[in-house]
Amino acid sequence: MVSPSSSQTPPPTAAAAHRLPRHHRLSAVVAASTRRADCRSRITPPGRRGGGGVGSIWVNPSAPPRRGVASRTLRRLVELDNLDAALRLLVGGPSSSSTPATSDSAPEPPAVITCNILIKKLCARRRLADAERVLEALKTSGAADAVSHNTLVAGYCRDGSLWDAERVLEAARASGAANVVTYTALIDGYCRSGRLTDALRLIASMPVAPDTYTYNTVLKGLCFAKQWEEAEELMREMIRNNCHPNEVTFATQIRAFCQNGLLDRAVELLEQMPKYGCMPDVVIYRLVNRAIEVYEQMPKYGITPDIFTYNALINGYSEQGCLDDALKFLSTMPCEPDTISYNSILKGLCRAERWKDAEKLVTEMLRKNCTPNEVTFKYANQLFIK
């Protein structure tokens, strides 16, 4: 005879969980909820087959408490990263187990959100087959949305399984669940794999309008492959389609141009940014500045920055409030600064109320026989007022 002390002690009930140590409470509640859900899943409504899978969570839509318990259990399992238990509750186990049972009832919205989080976590662990089983369970219940498909497409692309990503996208397109994010995820996969022709083909044929992020994704791929002409043409197409470039659009190309000795193209883009409501930040200006410093010491590039290039950088530093950088750049540039050079810094100094520095700058300008203009006098007058 087996003594009670040697028999297996059942897990505590949810009601008794508060007496456990704090770090065991949530696990106890989840276990209790799972037992209730398992018991209720064995109650098969008339006319419906029993079994695991989706039916084990959404057995009877007319019984909200039963659905709520199962949904909360699934959510807690996902929060605890107990993905195998979540899969058992949802689709009958990991991919080596049986296929999920079907259900003609749609899951409640919180469960759909939880399932999307589960898909994301499975993709992050490269468990893509299990992630697709969750997606199929959602599709069976009619609850799969764009987020469900987008996450799996991106997961397959990160894994290099572009054929599977294309297959999921086609299914999403057929069901009406594909949106611009779905197409952009596959385009990003093409670019990461060097399939730029496929990326350009898809961006030209996708039934929804590409957004700025879509174009930026392809531009990054083209710049990485040093396909400069194609990148410039894509940006022109972007503007023609009333999709305005943003700071990332410019920064991606400027960085690539600077790294590959195309300083003239970098400065040209730098000067175009305000036209599209984009203000270059100090990172971009310093990037171009470093490129100039390097290329000045490397004649093999055949690049000689002119006064227009330097003035663009000085004005950028001044606009960003980096006045010490602007002053340092002014004093070290190899060519003589002109009136525009001084005015750009003078404007920033007056705006920052650095009157002594502004006065020194005007004195230096006159000492170097650099003729002031109306803009110079406009800011110089503020010195007399102060």
Image (cartoon, rainbow, N blue to C red):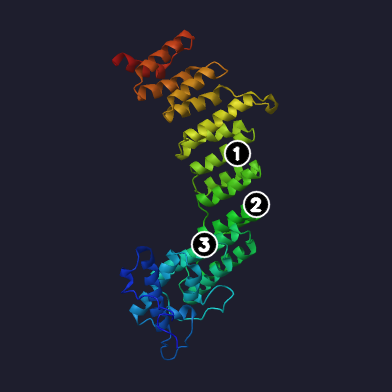
Q: Position of residue 97 (x, y in %)?
A: 57, 77
Q: Amino acid at mark 3?
A: Thr
Residue positioned most to the bottom: 46
Kindly identify which numbered label has been placed on residue 151: 3
Label 2: which residue? 196
- Whether 46 is drawn above or below 257: the answer is below
Q: Residue at x 36, y 25 (%)?
A: 351
Q: Secondary structure at mark 2?
A: helix
Q: Position of residue 330 (x, y in %)?
A: 50, 19
> Which is in the foreground here, disc 1 or disc 2?
1
Would residue 377 be seen by someone viewing this image from the given angle? no
Q: Secondary structure at mark 3?
A: helix
Q: Closer to the camera, 25 or 358?
A: 25
Q: Secondary structure at mark 1?
A: helix
Q: Find residue 125 and report its image quarter.
A: bottom right
Q: Residue at x 55, y 57 (%)?
A: 185
Q: Is residue 304 left or right of residue 327?
A: right
Label 1: which residue? 256
Q: Closer to the camera, 267 or 240?
A: 267
Q: Amino acid at mark 1?
A: Ala
What is the distance, in whole Å, between disc 2 and disc 3 at their CAs?
A: 22 Å
